[in-house]
Amino acid sequence: MHKLIGRKIIRHDSVTSTNEVLKELAIEGLEPGTVVVSAVQTKGHGRMERTWESPEGGLWLSVLLDATSEIELDKFGLIPLMAGCAVVCAISRIVGLDARVKWPNDVLIKGRKVCGILGEMMKAEEKQLAIIGIGLNVNNPVQEGYEFSQASTSIVEEMGDRASIEGLGAAIIDDLESAILSELELRNNMLAGGKFDDILNEWRTRSDTLGKRVKIRTQTEEIEGLARDIDESGSLLVERGDGRVEKVLVGDCEHVGE
Ligand code: BTN
């Protein structure tokens, strides 16, 4: 039983985008913690205004969080980070696969993207709200060429023969959904309790990015270097060849080597 996140779950067969549906409901005063899930999205979207293909078989959901009472504004960057860790833990608990987080907010299995997370902020009646959209490839065909760098995979693909047991696909989606919501609740409580270092440290230990050579594309430039760390706002600290450390808050990240 979820205390806050998932206390109310609104289910659809098909919507444009669970993030968009949740935004509309939030304007009408929907309670924080509410989740919108849809079997299909016809206009799913990702970061950098990309189209996120969302056919049947995947887990497409969005969660509404109250960011006014729970966290300071400069900690908003931690919400997608903690959501990534929640997804990694849920995958490990339900299907025993070893997933990792990739900066800024992807989840990878063996270097391939299995989940994308989209964090958006909005205001409704003076309240600062956060919407966390989670798209997890479970038993759907995966979208190739989504980003400039990234091959994709799905839970069922990574499970291999284990997934061919009849009926497993549908049951896994429900179990993953429930595990993700409870893992999110845990970390949302950590954020609300000001345990920012715990969130950052968990992300560091689950990271596939830190210690790797990365190429980052921001809106204005391309930065190449060693991913050293993340700072207290969730920005990536990249050390260039000349030793200068760049702080990147927003961008696309490609792992280019160990
Ligand atoms: C990304 O990797 O660019 C983020 C993808 C986020 C996709 C999810 S699916 C549920 C929610 N609804 C959307 O339209 N997008 C997010």
Image: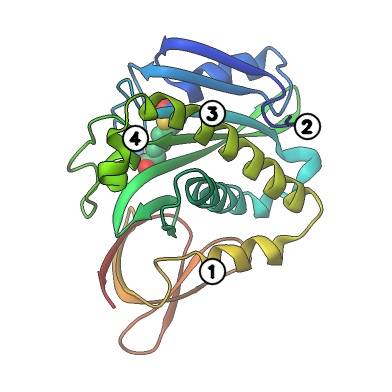
Q: Which residue is mark 3?
A: 62
Residue 187 image point, x, y percent: 68, 49
Q: Which residue is mark 2?
A: 3
**First in residue order: circle 1 vs circle 2:** 2
Q: Is residue 57 above or below residue 10?
A: below
Q: Under tag 3, what secondary structure?
A: strand
Can residue 153 be seen at all in this image of the molecule? no
Colouring used for the render? rainbow
**First in residue order: circle 3 vs circle 1:** 3
Q: Under tag 2, what secondary structure?
A: loop
Q: Which residue is mark 1?
A: 204
Snapshot quadrant of residue 1: top right
Q: Given this view, does label 1 or label 2 mark the residue nearer the observer? A: 2
Alpha-carbon neighbours of circle 3 within 10 Å: few (<14), some, or many (≥20)? many
The answer to whether the residue labelled 4 contacts the one labelled 3, judged by CB atoms less than 8 Å apart, is no
Q: CA distance from mark 1 to mark 4?
A: 27 Å
| Quadrant (top left/top right/bottom left/bottom right) for the C terminus | bottom left
Task: Classify residue 186 as left or right of residue 140.
Answer: right
**First in residue order: circle 4 vs circle 2:** 2
Q: Nearest the camera: 77 or 61?
A: 61
The answer to whether the residue labelled 3 contacts the one labelled 1, judged by CB atoms less than 8 Å apart, is no
Q: Amino acid at mark 2?
A: Lys
The answer to whether the residue labelled 4 contacts the one labelled 2, judged by CB atoms less than 8 Å apart, is no
Residue 108 image point, x, y percent: 36, 54
